[in-house]
Amino acid sequence: MRGVKVFAGRSHPDLAAAICERLGTQPGKCDLGYFANGETRVQLNTSIRNEDVFIVQSGSKNINDSVMELLIMIAACKGGSAKSITAVMPYFPYARSSKKKSHRGAITAKLLANLMAVAGVTHLITVDLHAAQMQGFFHHGIDNLHCEPLLVRWIKGSIPDWQNAVIVSKNVGGSKRVTALADILRLSFALCSTNRSRGAHHTNSNMTDSVVFFDAIEPQGIRVKQAGQYQNGVSSGNTDQHTDSPRLSQRRASANHADTSHTSSPQRSTRPRVVTINSSPLVHTTRQESASPSSSPDRGLLRVDTAPSARRPSEYEAQAGFHDEKARDVVIGRLVQGHIVDDDHPSPALSALSGFGFAERDSLEGPAMDPMTSSFMSTTSSVQEGHALGGTFDAAASSEDEEDEITTLEHTVTLVGNVRGKTAIIMDDIMDKSGSWVAAAETCVKIGGAKKVYCISIHALLGEGALEELDACDCIDHIVVTNTFPIPPDLSGISKKLVVIDLSNLLSEAIRRNHHGESVSSLFMQD
């Protein structure tokens, strides 16, 4: 193409060469290297005056060197009187630092956007930003391309019986991305959620699980039933957990008032009532009210029973008269050091404490909680550790931190959705460490009963040993990634499960349309 110069940084030379080949041009001549003291050196050896310049630079293992090299190349093109300077960054560095995760944290993605604007960039072409709101960081135009059309085409052409597949999110933060892909393919989706084991952090408390909090919300979320309607914590009648309508409540209140007005005895009924608190679809909390005349209206917490929809099929099927088919779509398992284990598997925390005496054990576990307080308060903390502002982390912020915890702590993993006998397609945008991917795959196969698992990611960062661990997992059949991030040839050769989708056609077409002033909206349309 005339009037176009494409320069390739050192981060991903293979992708840059493939883009230039599809455009029918050669990469611009430039010298890239280091000075003796380690500073980056850039020298352009061709004229770029009044031409559209495209600089292809993605992430790499030396991410800071790649960023600095890109900034110097942009500044060199600005000094060479280029007509426009477009940075082609398939993977945008520091994309996971798009928000503050602590009180004194930095929004590094915004900082990088400002540095690029100061250097002189006029446009940006990237692929699947980690957070869509990052487009507001830039003062110039940005084309955030999506890989969904390519992934859909690959799934339809490479996965046998893909109509019987289920798209699975390995954490809560990626549910939006997974549901979007499931809607395009018209498939069902599932969700894996991991929580820390309560036994490891028993000293924390959550006000939302306390009796005081339940008393405050009782008019809106509590239904009162007679004790005879419950057997072993499971209702034998209607399992609907929604509150009554205002009109029905008024009728019941009027009927109760009429009954009490015609009662000759001044004493109250001694029949106990069981109050069911519907604060979560997975948990039923039951409390018993004392009905003696001298008792106070205060109530004590008796027990916390797992809801039928959260139990394993063997548990709730044994309950007489319970036939809720939707409960089969929620299964729970134990996750110890990143792997699914049986219920009778010993806990690592208890095993570590078994060798200590009582004094040492108390010092490790922290101060003991008062029994009366522990009976009224849940063991789950509403303020997660490491959060300087208090409150809770959102799902997107905590998804990057789960990798370190999931391989060292004991967790409870919940699979919401039916994958039994189906192909599970685990989807996320970044594949860095292997812990959460292996845990999600084992959850789908060992607990959910999936027959085959595909792990699909857009940006294959593949940290140290990640690909080897994914390839060694028996529950993972295929690992599908794109080439937005460079994968060393020696690393890709060791895995027989790895499949790399080429994005050079998508990026080259975006460059061509950008140069000619054409619309790029057709690149987002599905076949």
Image (tube, rainbow, N blue to C red):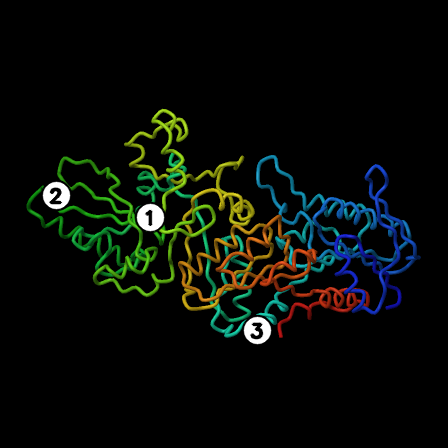
The residue at the point 24 percent across, 60 percent down is 318
Left or right, 23 with respect to 336, comes to right
Which amino acid, mark 1? Asp
Q: Quadrant of residue 351?
A: top left
Secondary structure of the residue carrying tag 1 is loop
Front position among marks 2 and 3: 3
Q: Which one is in front, 70 or 295?
A: 70
Secondary structure of the residue carrying tag 2 is loop
Of the numbered discs 3 and 1, the one sitting upstream in the chain is: 3
Please, is residue 171 above or below residue 153 in the view?
A: above
Q: Position of residue 181 (x, y in %)?
A: 55, 65
Q: CA distance from mark 1 to mark 2?
A: 47 Å
The residue at the point 34 percent across, 29 percent down is 368
Q: CA distance from mark 2 to mark 3?
A: 67 Å
Label 1: which residue? 344
Label 3: which residue? 156
Q: Position of residue 475 (x, y in %)?
A: 48, 60
Q: Quadrant of residue 126?
A: bottom right
Label 2: which residue? 268
The residue at the point 28 percent across, 59 percent down is 316
Q: Position of residue 306 (x, y in %)?
A: 31, 51
